Amino acid sequence: MQLHHLRDAHDPVLDDYRSLTDTALRRVREPAGGLYIAESAKVIERALQAGHRPRSVLTQQKWTDAVAELLGQRDVPVYVVTDEVAEQLTGFAVHRGVMAAMHRPEPARLQHLLSQIDTERPRIAVLEGLTDHTNVGAIFRSAAALGVDAVLVSPTCADPLYRRAVRVSMGTVFQVPWTRIDRWPAGIDDLRSAGYLVAGMTLGHGAITLDDLVAQSPERLALIFGTEGDGIRPETDRLLDRRVTIPMMGGVDSLNVAAASAVAFYATR
């Protein structure tokens, strides 16, 4: 690694880390710049294990030995700054010791991703229009823990590689294959052509229970989760093979989408 001790938060070489709390800015800057931010040694380690390439690393002096161990023989610039410079640069107090600007990998084509799934009874999750990065990260973590084969995200869904989503997922966003569906909801036809039964998680009338879906034992299953507020869009709902609900008790009418996904993933495992 190449150590660079920097004292000026306005140094242009640090631009990848600038204003990390400005969500609107980062949503545009990161995909356009072909990068994402990985925060904490554990998350960076999982990104490296997945074959992702670091552009640079930002850290403080006391963490340089740990960074050297993390990077191994990789020839990567490591910018060493004080706590004050890190906070001025990023917009928040950096407590996790290290973050990395990573090259954003090219997204897989949908057909290629589906063709790479070789489990006996594959399951995929589809996230339609989710806006909360915390929910996206939590769903990826549940997907990894409960053996979901892939996650697909609609064109309007929050970025799974946004810093908060990556952090909440604990780096599992690098473990679960995923891509963005450019044609949506028309892309449901692609899933059906690949042999998937397309089931939407909904509160609407005419839905079967999750237990009923499990009893049908579909060979290939795609579970669609809608937005945090409105759920699955009407134009998507009309294309579903099944409408599925989780029975509720105690006067509760719904679960948070991340919690609902964990229940659905566990039930259909």
Image: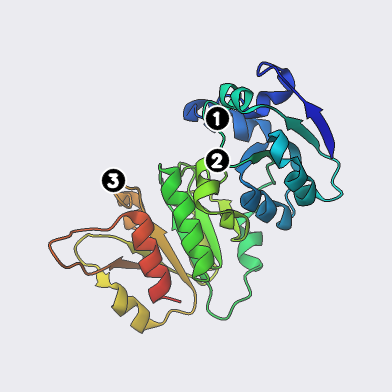
Circle 2 packing at 10 Å, graded few (<14), some (14-19), many (20+), is many
Marks 1/2 in contact by CB < 8 Å: the verdict is yes
The image position of residue 194, as x and y in percent, is: 55, 68
**Residue wearing tag 3:** 229
Residue 83: quarter of image? top right
Q: CA distance from mark 1 to mark 2?
A: 8 Å
Question: Mark 2: which secondary structure?
Answer: helix
Q: Which numbered circle lies on residue 20? A: 1
Residue 236 coordinates in the image, percent (x, y): 36, 53
Spot occupied by residue 163 in the image (x, y as percentages of width and height): 55, 40
Residue 195 placement, left or right of 128: right
Give the residue type at disc 3: Gly
At 32% from the left edge and 56% from the top edge, which residue is drawn?
237
- First in sequence: mark 3 vs mark 1: 1
Numbered circle sitting on residue 163: 2
Picture coordinates of residue 16 (x, y %)? Answer: 66, 28
Question: How much space separates mark 3 and mark 2, taking CA atoms?
Answer: 23 Å
Tell which of 200 and 86 is nearer to you: 86
User: Is residue 215 among the parts visible in the rendering?
Assistant: yes
Q: Does residue 90 lie above or below 147 as drawn? A: above
Residue at image point 60% right, 28% down: 29
Q: Earlier in the sequence, mark 1 or mark 2?
A: 1
Q: Report how far apart the C-alphas of labels 3 and 1 lie in the structure.
A: 26 Å
Label 3 CA crowd tier, 10 Å (few <14, some 14–19, many 20+): few
Crowd band around label 1 with a 10 angstrom C-alpha radius: few (<14), some (14–19), many (20+): some
Q: Residue at x 74, y 42 (%)?
A: 54
Label 3 sits on a secondary structure element that is loop
Q: Is residue 136 above or below residue 124?
A: above
Tell us which disc is closer to us: 3 or 2.
2
Q: Is residue 122 left or right of residue 245?
A: right
Q: Kindly identify the amino acid type of the residue bearing the numbered disc 1.
A: Leu
